[in-house]
Amino acid sequence: MVSDAIQLAFQHSDFLPVPGGSDHYVAAVQNKPGELDALRHASPETWSRLTPLVEIVGPKKPPEAYKRETVVGWVRRVSDAVGHRPCFLDVLRLRPGHPTTTSSGTGPVLAVIHAAARKRGMAFVPVLPISGNDSRDHLRLVGDAAACDGRGAALRYPIRRIALGPGTTHTTVLASAVKGLGMDVTYADVLVDLGYLSGDEELHAEDVGEALKEVTAVGEWRSVVLLGTSMPSMLGGTVGEGTIGELPRREWELWSALKRDPPGRLPTYGDYVVQHPDPPHDDDGGGPSMRANVRYTINSTTLVARGRGSVIQEGREQYRDLCQQLVGRPEFAGRDFSWGDAEIAACANGEIQPGWQNHWRGAGSSHHFRLVTEQLSR
């Protein structure tokens, strides 16, 4: 268990990472150039309803020890996009205790990330993933950061993947985790992560609502967030090449159903923007066989304009055609709607050169941020 000193650090804390409650929006983004560009260009109005959950993604093949300069560079790029605004800070594909060179020898990579974020004045909340293989290193490092900075901690709870043993419930699992951090639940946030919502799975709002009742039975969480996405890891088989397909936003439909019939406390809406939860690795996720695509969120679906052949074979010029297709549709919000819409329009009109996939990942994210915050404001 982390030291009880954490309790003292929060006696007079009024820090709220999700100030708008159920009218706010939590966007799970990876520290990829496109998504960071989208955050960097978000308007003040969008930021007023947006709190990012930033995931720092480690390399597929980690070195024996990370260089401190490399890790600090990861954090610097996130800081440049987020500034001093509240954010949740998590890691993906990174073992928290992985050795990292420091001026005094080696230290765990997660501690180096937290120290670098602290030095840059980031108002971050450290995130503790809850799973069947919980790491004591992760618990200790998140607890240390919470004690040092006094902004509490967030628990990321993959509610559909947790195996509940005899005598355990979502309530007991989460209560045990909060106790392990040594803090009162009123200084903790819970990010209830539904993950990828496949169209082949049946998931009803009533069932999610019952599970959320167990989550909120732990106590008065500082915030409760419901995360999910319907974006597959690969578009092949869901959107044909050379077409514009539509993917349902099941996560939005689910949250909207909960809002109509709240299960007690209505959670804050969260999603993975226009990406799958896992880092991109192949097909339309970023591998050599990737097809060019631009993703554009509308009310209850995501439009996906998809090119023909791989980007390597066809080149980036095909993005201009995809942008022209989107601009020609009645759902296009106009170039003044967001930075991303301006980039789509400019590419369609030949005002800028077509970028690569990261750029259009950012443009789609930028439009999504604005659209979702406006949906919530309505």
Image (spheres, rainbow, N blue to C red):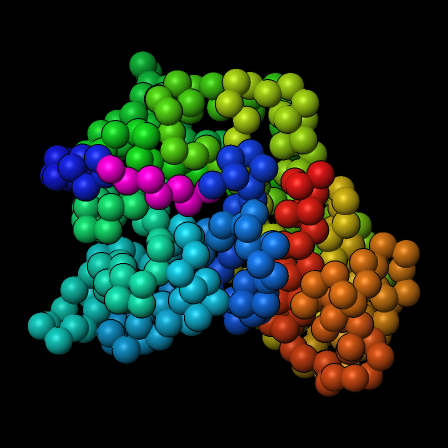
Q: Is residue 347 above or below residue 286?
A: below
249 vs 314: above or below:
above
Q: In percent of the image, x 41 and y 52: which residue is there? A: 86
Question: In this view of the protein, which residue sits in the foreground, 103 or 46?
Answer: 46
Q: Is residue 198 left or right of residue 337?
A: left
Could you tell me if residue 258 is visible in this image?
yes
Classify residue 118 by image quadrant: bottom left
In the image, 62 versus 245, the foreground residue is: 245
Does residue 172 belong to the magenta stretch?
Answer: no
Q: Is residue 153 visible?
A: no
The C terminus lies in quadrant = top right
What residue sits 43% from the left and 64% below the top? Answer: 83
Q: Between residues 279 and 324, which one lies in front from this camera angle? A: 324
Dominant SS in magenta: loop
Which region shows up in magenta?
A: 12-18
Figure check: 181 above or below 107:
above
Closer to us: 61 or 340 = 340
The residue lying at 40 percent from left, 67 percent from top is 79
Q: Could you tell whether 222 is left or right of 182 in the image?
A: right
Q: Is residue 308 left or right of residue 31?
A: right
Above or below 219: residue 224 = below
Q: Position of residue 204 (x, y in %)?
A: 64, 24
Query: In the image, what residue occupies the spot 25% across and 76% down?
Result: 67
The percent position of residue 337, horizontal first and vertical second, equals 74, 61
Residue 284: % across, % down: 65, 64
Residue 108 is situated, as x and y percent measured from the top left of the image, at 20, 61
- Which of the image's four quarters has the N terminus? top left
Q: Which of the 4 image quarters holds residue 143?
A: top left
Q: Can you name the residue that lies furthest to the top here?
A: 167
Q: Please identify the residue farthest to the left as the structure is shown.
A: 104
